[in-house]
Image (cartoon, grey):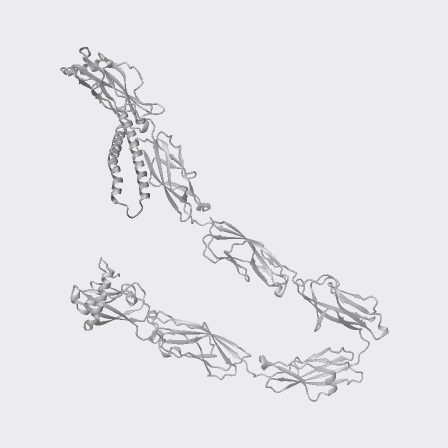
Amino acid sequence: MQQSRSPIQQPDIQRGMFLLLAALSLASCSLAAELVYRLKEESPSGTLIGNLAADLQLAAGVTYNLASESGPGRFVELDRETGELRSSAAVLDREEVCPEPGRTECALLLDVILLPPRLFRLLKLRLLVEDVNDRPPRFPAASIGVWVPEDAEPGSRYPLEPPAEDPEPGLNGLLRYRLEGAGGVFSLLGQAGDGAGPEAAAAPLLVLERALDRELRDVYEMRLIAADSGSPPLSGTATVTVSVTDINDNCPRFPEAELSLSLYSNLSVGAEIARLQARDPDLGYNARVLYSYGERVPPASRRLFSLDSASGSVRLAAPIPPAAAPLHRLTVLATGTGCMPVTAALRLRIVPALAGPPALSPRYIALQAEGVVYLRESEPARTPIAFFTVSQPQAQLRPLRCYLEAAAAFRLAPYPALQDEYLLETAQPLDYELQPLYQVTVVAENAKRLATRTHIKIQLLDVNDNSPLFTNPLLNVTIEENNPPNTFLIEMKATDADSGEMGTVTYLLGPQVPPTFILDKFTGSLTVSTSLDREEQETYRLIIRAVDGGYPARESTATVLLTVLDANDNSPRFINKDFSFFVPEDYPSFSEIGVIGVIDPDAGKNGWVALSILNGSGHFVIDTGKGNLMANAPLDREQQSSYVLWVQAMDGGEPALSTVAKVTVLLIDVNDNPPLVLFPQSNLSFLLVLPSTVPGSSITEVYAVDKDTGMNAVIAYSIIGHRGPRPETFVINAGTGNITLHETLLKNDHGLYRLLVKVSDHGYPEPLHSTVIVNLFVNETLSNESYIENLLRKDPGIRIEESPPETRADPFQTELDVFPCETVLIALSALCFGLFALVFALVCYISLRKKRHRRKEYSVAEGSKTEDPRQSLLPPLADQGTRKKGCLQFRS
């Protein structure tokens, strides 16, 4: 409901009145009163808050004025006549008006001035804003993490911080918590508090219900729900993640307490004999295990067999001497963090070596570390890797043979000039992308087919030998014009078969790409930063570069063909604002009058234009395709000389756009109307002419009009036939149609004269004419009128004596030859020219005098003397100009 206001608003006067009344209110504090009203927040517009007239018990005639409509006043509307106070269209939000936490009362203070001055009163309104449960509780963080040690006692409590927040007061901000998905392992000790009070920050407590074991389960996820106490209640949710932290509650254990092994006495030094590993289910430092020999392990055994303290690996540390003990018992201790050592026994029986396979000793040429040979993939074929020496102490077991097992990419060949020496080299170029790791087995075999196998790992090192490859090197993308800024177009994808930094692809824009396109160098996401206009440019060819991280870098390109789709964003546009066409009035129907040019830069149906006539003229049609304007009915200038058409051009878009242009069709006159004789009205009418008429007197006139215009309407009169006693007695003026007496009438000239008058226009190419008979009866009196009328009816026709009409060759030529003021005009022209020369001479003379007397002593008398001649000459000059003007007007 809108606030009712007086029809006339005078802001300046009213503002001054309010300032005056405010000053009066300060001086008259006893006149102020206060009313308290309540209003729920977010009340709809027009909600009745109270009636000041009813509450103050005031009679009619009081005007209620809200002192300010800004600030708190924008939320209410006050009816000046009835005093009704209602809510306005502005939404009243209690949390916005009173944002202070812990505030239980929110009030708006309004001032109302009661008028007229004799009833002046300043009224204080206190509008209490009541809270509505419109804001759900909200957790500052969507996830709450809690760390609980696995040895925590049941009943332990952990605060879930930060707690939920609700800025509303009272029950609407009183929060209650519940926990979902705890599975009985945890429970919640909720702490309810008013969202606007001091307990609002109290966090709920997570209570451990059962003992935990990290080795069984290390993470618990639950949902914490906070609901307020409003009606209806609102709630918010956060995820609670409980991580169980490890404690050292487990000690290492050996899977087997005792292990027995046999080994030959010719075992190679460094060979691994056994690996004793104790398991500890704890994590990190708590699972650390150290291995050591027991105190009862003899020193000889310690020197012969080494023990790795970190891995528990037992290896042959020195060659086994022939006098070595056949049995060795090794006690291995596994010590965990904070745990007592556990033991395992390793029994080793040394078996004398019989005649065995040959020995194979490698010497590496390529880079080797920890049994792995590293080789660059760019190395050519026949790159040396290692030398292998084959030895066999027993001569009866010779000859020896050394070869590779299933290694097509490598070859092993005897080295020239050296016995039992073999060179391992590459047999072909290697490719890291096809196979980065090779397992090569070198076999040495004696005559009894006893063999020794040495396994070698060859790891290829990658080089930047591959360029990035786009998934699709040519992409077609479309986008509709007038797109919003930063519109996503496409995400480019390129892969590089190389590894590491050499396989990292960075995307860049190619040369000559407009700066409006932006390419994310890491993701390949292509966007356009501004709106595109198809009419400005329809297609774009964008070159995208993919560059790897190698040195030198390798790159490849892809092409994005972007097509901007048309939108109907251009109205049809006429080539002219107004069109004017001149058409002869006898122009054939459905012939082209003119072309109405219209263009639409849009494409497709958006650029297809249909033309139509809006003002519904039935005389014209338009060819929509060509824009030809045609008349579908005969045109007559005498009925209508011009047509104004409003032509609409509408395109085929959705929604369609249109433009209107004004088209004026002006009809050119055609000589299609003969002159119409208005007087005399009939060939039977006659006129009495007295014999005493003076020659040169006007007897009568023939008056005719022509509906055409221009030369087609210029009329010439001529007498083409005579009958009477002396027919040449009367003549007609060719231009005016005035018939005058040419000669003095004699006694023999009495009688009836019949003049056949031809009225002709000056039309082109052929003039049109009409005829009329002028009857003149020369006599003293008209004694028998009926006799003359009978005579006119019975009298035969008049023979036409065709003669050229007395007309001018050019109807627009001024008749200077018959102008009576020609001599006067020439004299006046000469006089005007002489006066002009005299005035010009006087002006030059005065100018020279002024140049000589520029000092301040220049006398006024001398100035007046120079002015008298001009004053005496100007009036005659003006008079002559007036005469000349009058004479010219008479001629025209």
**In which image quadrant can residue 288 be found?**
bottom right
The tally of labels here is 0
Residue in view at x 49 percent, y 82 percent: 210
Residue at the bottom extreme of this rendering: 296
Q: Position of residue 666 (x, y in %)?
A: 34, 34
**In which image quadrant can residue 438 be found?**
bottom right
Q: Position of residue 611 (x, y in %)?
A: 39, 41
Residue at the right extreme of this rendering: 396
In this view of the protein, which residue sits in the foreground, 187 or 665? 665
Quick check: 356 above or below 689?
A: below
Residue at the top extreme of this rendering: 748
Quick check: 46 above or below 277?
A: above
Q: Quadrant of the N terminus?
A: bottom left
Is any atom of residue 797 visible in this view? no
In the rendered structure, the answer to whether residue 179 lies left or right of residue 363 reads left
Q: Quadrant of the C terminus?
A: top left
Q: Position of residue 881 (x, y in %)?
A: 26, 33
In the rendered structure, the answer to whether residue 465 lies left or right of residue 317 reads left
In this view of the protein, which residue sits in the foreground, 117 or 104? 117
Quick check: 867 above or below 381?
A: above
In this view of the protein, which residue sits in the foreground, 862 or 154? 862
Q: Position of residue 102 (x, y in %)?
A: 34, 76
In this view of the protein, which residue sits in the foreground, 804 or 188? 804
Residue in view at x 35 percent, y 23 percent: 766
Is any atom of residue 533 visible in this view? yes
